[in-house]
């Protein structure tokens, strides 16, 4: 409260000194003069449950951003410009820390978060003064119109603001003998039996593939490995240049190799089916 009050001329001179000369002393003087504004705005958000010290810190960050981006040539007082940066910084902090579940980041969600309850209370007062009772769906429609956001966003925000966070390790009730909420979540990971079967199938397929490759000659095996078993498969043209063959000839050899492998794999699969028949 003992910080100096800057007149328009002094404020402008400090802003030019920081923008044009990067004079840190001028920047600090400008920021210190308006810290009372930052603290005053931070106090307006205490009802959201955030520590006052954290709110002041976020307001200070917003004030510093405003000082860094302020353009004195626009003819606007620094306090008028800084208000928007301070408010945005505090609002972002409140929304990040309101819940472990992200509340929202779009402009419509932010507008709803900070205005929905106020607008709803006013609409309820107006309806009560006329002897009316607004149904929930009608109330949502009026809020959406008043705030200028889609009805769907109002419904989502209403659900997010209706309750607080609960730990998944909290017990469901005293009768459940310590059963926690996390025990009710479905486990989407593979079961042990599925994992064993998957590994077994992969081992069988690997043996079949090795056997099928073993039925090829050296040139066919080389072409298949370079074309299908590399992370970066080679082109027919590059293989032809290396082997001294035309691109079409390499394609023919590749097709012939695949035909041999297909017969080998089909033969092995029939043997397995016959064994279990």
Image (spheres, rainbow, N blue to C red):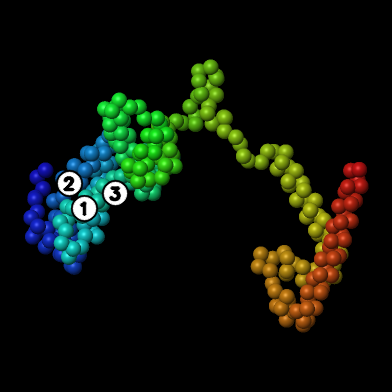
Residue at 18 percent across and 53 percent down: it is 80
Residue 268 in the image, given as x and y percentages of width and height: 87, 54
Whichever of labels 1 and 2 marks the residue nearer the N terminus, that label is: 2
Residue 121 visible at all = no
Which residue carries the number 3 mark? Answer: 88
Residue 43 in the image, given as x and y percentages of width and height: 22, 39
Label 2 sits on a secondary structure element that is helix
Label 1 sits on a secondary structure element that is helix
Q: Is residue 270 placed above or below 165 in the rendered structure?
A: below
Residue 225 in the image, given as x and y percentages of width and height: 75, 67
Residue 82 is tagged as 1
Q: Is residue 9 placed above or below 123 in the rendered structure?
A: below
In the picture, measured across the screen, residue 126 lies left or right of residue 1, that is: right
Residue 161 in which image quadrant: top left
Label 3 sits on a secondary structure element that is helix
Q: Whole-Å distance between the Cαs marked 3 and 1?
A: 10 Å
Whichever of labels 2 and 3 marks the residue nearer the N terminus, that label is: 2
Residue at 26 percent across and 36 percent down: it is 46
Which residue carries the number 2 mark? Answer: 37
Residue 240 in which image quadrant: bottom right
Residue 197 in the image, given as x and y percentages of width and height: 75, 43
Q: Contact (CB < 8 A) between labels 1 and 2?
A: yes
Residue at 63 percent across and 41 percent down: it is 189
Q: Whole-Å distance between the Cαs marked 2 and 3?
A: 14 Å
Whichever of labels 3 and 1 marks the residue nearer the N terminus, that label is: 1
Q: Residues within 10 Å of mark 2 (few under 14, many from 20)?
A: some
Residue 13 in which image quadrant: bottom left
Name the residue furthest top: 175
Residue at 77 percent across and 48 percent down: it is 201
């Amino acid at each position: 409260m003992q910080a100096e009050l800057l007149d328009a001329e002094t404020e402008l001179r400090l802003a030019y000194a920081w923008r044009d000369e990067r004079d840190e002393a001028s920047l600090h003087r400008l920021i210190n003069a308006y810290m009372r504004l930052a603290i005053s705005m931070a106090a307006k958000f205490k009802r959201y449950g955030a520590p006052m010290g954290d709110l002041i810190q976020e307001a200070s960050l917003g004030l510093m951003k405003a000082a860094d981006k302020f353009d004195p040539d626009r003819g606007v007082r620094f306090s008028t410009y800084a208000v928007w940066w301070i408010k945005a910084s505090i609002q972002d902090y409140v929304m990040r820390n309101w819940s472990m579940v992200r509340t929202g980041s779009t402009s419509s969600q932010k507008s709803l978060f900070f205005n929905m309850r106020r607008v709803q209370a006013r609409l309820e007062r107006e309806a009560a003064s006329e002897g009316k009772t607004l149904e929930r769906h009608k109330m949502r429609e009026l809020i959406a119109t008043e705030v200028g956001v889609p009805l769907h966003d109002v419904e989502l925000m209403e659900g997010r603001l209706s309750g607080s966070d609960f730990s998944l390790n909290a017990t469901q009730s005293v009768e459940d003998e310590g059963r926690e909420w996390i025990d009710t979540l479905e486990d989407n990971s593979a079961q042990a039996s599925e994992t064993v079967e998957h590994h077994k199938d992969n081992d069988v397929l690997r043996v079949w593939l090795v056997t099928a490759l073993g039925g090829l000659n050296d040139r066919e095996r080389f072409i298949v490995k370079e074309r299908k078993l590399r992370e970066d498969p080679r082109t027919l043209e590059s293989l032809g240049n290396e082997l001294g063959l035309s691109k079409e000839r390499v394609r023919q050899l590749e097709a012939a190799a695949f035909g041999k492998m297909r017969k080998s794999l089909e033969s092995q699969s029939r043997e397995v089916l016959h064994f279990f028949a």
